[in-house]
């Protein structure tokens, strides 16, 4: 059975799932969702995902949403023994912590700061920007003395965080002033399997969307 992924190319959560599929050498049947035209609110999509979010994965009749859940599911089912999501409890706990850090802190703070500006015309909020700077400093600390965010090996934590952090390129947030973050970001471009296709293309789409909304 094919793995159907309902997605938006520019979405960081969608890009993190694409990166995971590349790392596992999985082929996805990509199904584009046009949010502008309300594809996510159509009855057939709501039947799959009542929360009408992207991405949504359908595997043999099972619909799963929330990108980090999808990422873990793909490794658990199709990548047994993969270091992307280690089975050893201590190592997995660290990866989980970084995954939750992304959804609850890094990506959440970026969305709270940037999306009201792009989609609502709100002015930049310096207090919200300060919270992003705090999150980046935490990531910089996580990376001190190690190659990847959860240890010596590439994991799902790196894939979700690089999708989020790369999105900052469309904003005024200068994440490259954090030395460890900058080093890690450049490393990810060359070590994450299929990075160009899975993340860069979508990032370009996100930048184009932001540019069009600012006109």
Image (cartoon, rainbow, N blue to C red):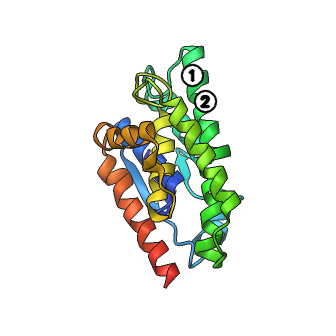
94, above or below 178, in the image: above
Closer to the camera in the image, 51 or 12 = 12
Q: Quadrant of residue 100?
A: top right
Q: Dot 1 surroundings within 10 Å: few (below 14), some, or many (20 or more)?
A: some
Image x and y of residue 71, in percent: 52, 39
Image x and y of residue 208, in percent: 41, 73
- The residue drawn where x is 35% and y is 60% is 201
SS under mark 2? helix
Image x and y of residue 192, in percent: 34, 39
Image x and y of residue 63, in percent: 60, 48
Quadrant showing the N terminus:
top left
Question: Does any portion of residue 3 appear in the rendered image?
Answer: no
Question: Does any portion of residue 93 appear in the rendered image?
Answer: yes
- Residues at discs 2 and 1 in contact (Cβ within 8 Å): yes
Residue 160 relative to residue 125: left or right = left
- The residue drawn where x is 61% and y is 44% is 135
Q: Quadrant of residue 211?
A: bottom left
In three-dimensional space, the C-alpha distance between marks 2 and 1, rounded to whole angstroms, equals 6 Å
SS under mark 1? helix
Q: Which residue is mark 2?
A: 96
Closer to the camera in the image, 19 or 80 = 19
Q: Dot 2 surroundings within 10 Å: few (below 14), some, or many (20 or more)?
A: some
Q: Which residue is mark 1?
A: 92
- The residue drawn where x is 45% and y is 40% is 181
77, above or below 66, in the image: above
- The residue drawn where x is 45% and y is 66% is 206
> Could you tell me how many numbered marks the image carries?
2
Closer to the camera in the image, 58 or 56 = 56
Toward the bottom, the furthest residue is 215
- Residue 177, numbered circle: none
208, above or below 4, in the image: below
């Amino acid at each position: 059975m094919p793995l159907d992924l309902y997605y938006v190319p520019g979405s960081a959560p969608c890009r993190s799932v694409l990166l995971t599929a590349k790392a596992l050498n999985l082929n996805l049947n990509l199904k584009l969702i046009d949010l502008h035209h309300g594809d996510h609110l159509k009855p057939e999509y709501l039947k799959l995902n009542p929360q009408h979010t992207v991405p949504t994965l359908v595997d043999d009749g099972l619909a799963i949403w929330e990108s980090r859940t999808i990422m873990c599911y793909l490794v658990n089912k199709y990548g047994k023994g993969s270091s992307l999501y280690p089975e050893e409890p201590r190592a997995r706990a660290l990866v989980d912590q970084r995954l939750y850090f992304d959804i609850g802190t890094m990506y959440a703070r970026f969305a709270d700061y940037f999306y009201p500006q792009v989609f609502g015309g709100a002015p930049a909020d310096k207090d919200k920007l300060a919270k992003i700077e705090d999150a980046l400093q935490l990531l910089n600390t996580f990376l001190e003395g190690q190659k990847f965010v959860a240890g010596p090996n590439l994991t799902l934590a790196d894939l979700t965080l690089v999708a989020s952090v790369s999105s900052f390129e469309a904003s005024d947030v200068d994440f490259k002033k954090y030395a460890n973050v900058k080093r890690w970001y450049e490393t990810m471009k060359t070590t994450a399997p299929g990075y160009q296709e899975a993340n860069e293309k979508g990032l370009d789409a996100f930048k184009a969307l932001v540019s069009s909304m600012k006109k």
